[in-house]
Image (spheres, rainbow, N blue to C red):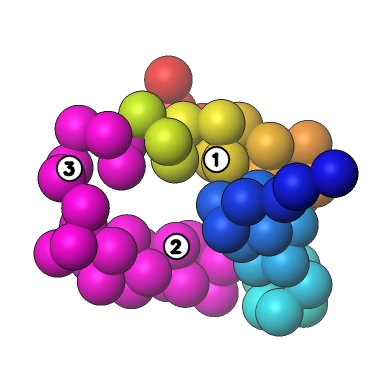
């Protein structure tokens, strides 16, 4: 089974930040800023939607959409 970078990010972000929602959000924001400098914004946004959706299953947070 092949696991992509963004799937790994969705699984590991809450573990790295010990479930702290503020730190998880900051990690996602900083990584998004770095990655969007390389990848075009529209494909990156489309790729990150499932990542954020999967984070809602791991943490108690709910997306705003």
22 or 3: which is nearer to us?
3
Which residue is at 44% across, 40% downward? 48
Which residue lies under the disc numbered 1?
52
Tell me, yes or no, whether the two marked residues, 2 and 1, touch with CB atoms within 8 Å.
yes
**In the figure, 36 relative to 41: above or below?**
below
46 falls in the magenta region: no
Q: Position of residue 45 (x, y in %)?
A: 31, 36
51 or 40: which is nearer to us?
40
2 vs 3, front mark: 3
30 falls in the magenta region: yes
**In the figure, 18 relative to 53: above or below?**
below
Residue closest to the far front: 1
Is 5 placed left or right of 17 in the picture?
A: left
Q: Position of residue 5 (x, y in %)?
A: 57, 58
Q: Which residues are magenta?
A: 22-45
Q: Position of residue 41 (x, y in %)?
A: 17, 42
Q: Position of residue 2 (x, y in %)?
A: 75, 47
Which residue lies under the disc numbered 3?
41
43 or 48: which is nearer to us?
43
Q: Could you say whether the residue bearing mark 3 is in a helix, strand or loop?
A: helix
Quarter of the figure with residue 17: bottom right
Quadrant containing the C terminus in the rendered view: top left
């Amino acid at each position: 089974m092949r696991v992509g970078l963004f799937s790994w990010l969705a699984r590991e972000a809450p573990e790295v930040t010990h479930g702290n929602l503020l730190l998880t959000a900051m990690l996602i924001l900083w990584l998004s800023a770095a990655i969007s400098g390389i990848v075009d914004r529209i494909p990156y946004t489309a790729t990150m939607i499932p990542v954020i959706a999967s984070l809602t299953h791991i943490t108690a947070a709910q997306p705003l959409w």
